[in-house]
Image (tube, helix red, strand yellow):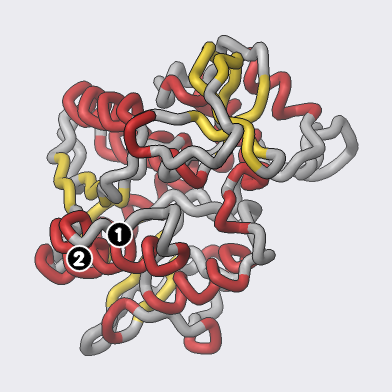
Amino acid sequence: MLSPGGASAEWPRPSLAALEAEAIYILREAIAEARTPVLLFSGGKDSTVLAHLACRAFHPSRPPVPLLHIDSTWEFRELLEFRDRFAHRYGFDLRVAHNEAGRAAGINPFDHGDRYTTVMRTDPLKSALDAGRYDIILGGARRDEERSRAKERIVSVRGPQHTWEPRRQRPELWSLFNFRLGMQETARVFPLSNWTELDVLAYALAHDVELAPLYLARPRPVLARDGQLIVVDEPHRMPLRPGEHLEERTVRFRTLGCWPVTAAEESDAETLEAVVAQTLHSRRSERSGRLGDRDAGGSLEQQKRDGYF
């Protein structure tokens, strides 16, 4: 049996089959209750497994929900290629949103910090959700990722402007979920809430789910900065400090975001089997490579309240 930290121990984790059954049940219930559902797709491992589960939930029909990707304009090129390939392979209707005004204004992660996340991710997400009139928004967030996400219900009610208030969330006893929405309310629904990082990777391995190649170790151009390894996806956009230079190292990612603010780790895990084995024995936080998480979750909670997650 696997402990939540990845060590071998006696701990009553649900089986992958039980987690799959729960997620498929939530997906079917959510889409049955929705007027206009959508599935948020970042191209990361969680949203990829969630989209795969949506296919299984409604097989042999085509997925009855579109994928929505928010392109911050600082995405890994490999991730965008994977996104398009995945959507085509599984027959999804892929919809992409971005903030052209923010791009034209030069909003970037180096100079604008949390404002960058607001302008290039939160604002276009809210605009896309409003434009599509989506009421049920499916996402791949898991409770074990960080503390602000641990406060989420599986069905997370959002108020006007997609704002989130923890005290307004509904109880979820005996796996009963309330999808009823009032005026100006929507719901973010998280079928993978009870999964762990290891569960997601083990499920992908067991079911042959292709993940973005960034999760596998490859030689990549890296900048060592402040104790972190930044894979420089577009060298012409990376401002170097005096004395800094790029070097090639064999690295992989455990979590994916915008390339300037997502650090990699050195690894020799070139296959998903090796990634699962490394994760099993890891003592580092999955999100230790998210440079924006260094404030211990304060800004992440505010982003959630403003409507991002």
Tell me which residue sits at (44%, 49%) in the image: 140
Q: Position of residue 134 (x, y in %)?
A: 18, 65
Residue farthest to the left, as pictured: 131
Whether residue 188 is situated above or below residue 232 in the rendered picture: below
Vertical relation: 249 (above or below) 181: above
Count residues near mark 2 (Cα–Cα under 10 Å), then give few for <14, some for 14-19, many for 20+: many
Given residues 220 and 21, the one toward you in this image is 220
Q: Identify the residue at the far right of this view.
A: 9
**Circle 1 Cα neighbour tier, 10 Å, few/some/many (<14 / 14–19 / ≥20):** many
Q: Residue sitting at 63 percent across and 66 percent down?
A: 297
Question: Measured from the top left, where is residue 175 in percent x and y?
Answer: 53, 63
Quadrant of image for the N terminus: top right
Percent coordinates x, y for residue 144 in the rendering: 65, 53
Question: Residue placed at 57% from the left, 63% from the top?
Answer: 149
Is residue 298 in view from this perspective? yes
> Horizontally, is 138 left or right of 268 in the view?
left
In this view, 223 is above or below 298: above
Q: Residue 70 location in percent, x, y? A: 26, 51
> What residue is at 78 percent from the left and 35 percent from the top?
6
Which residue is under mark 2?
A: 129
Q: Which residue is mark 1?
A: 107
Question: Is any atom of residue 53 visible in this view?
Answer: no
In this view, 126 is above or below 109: below
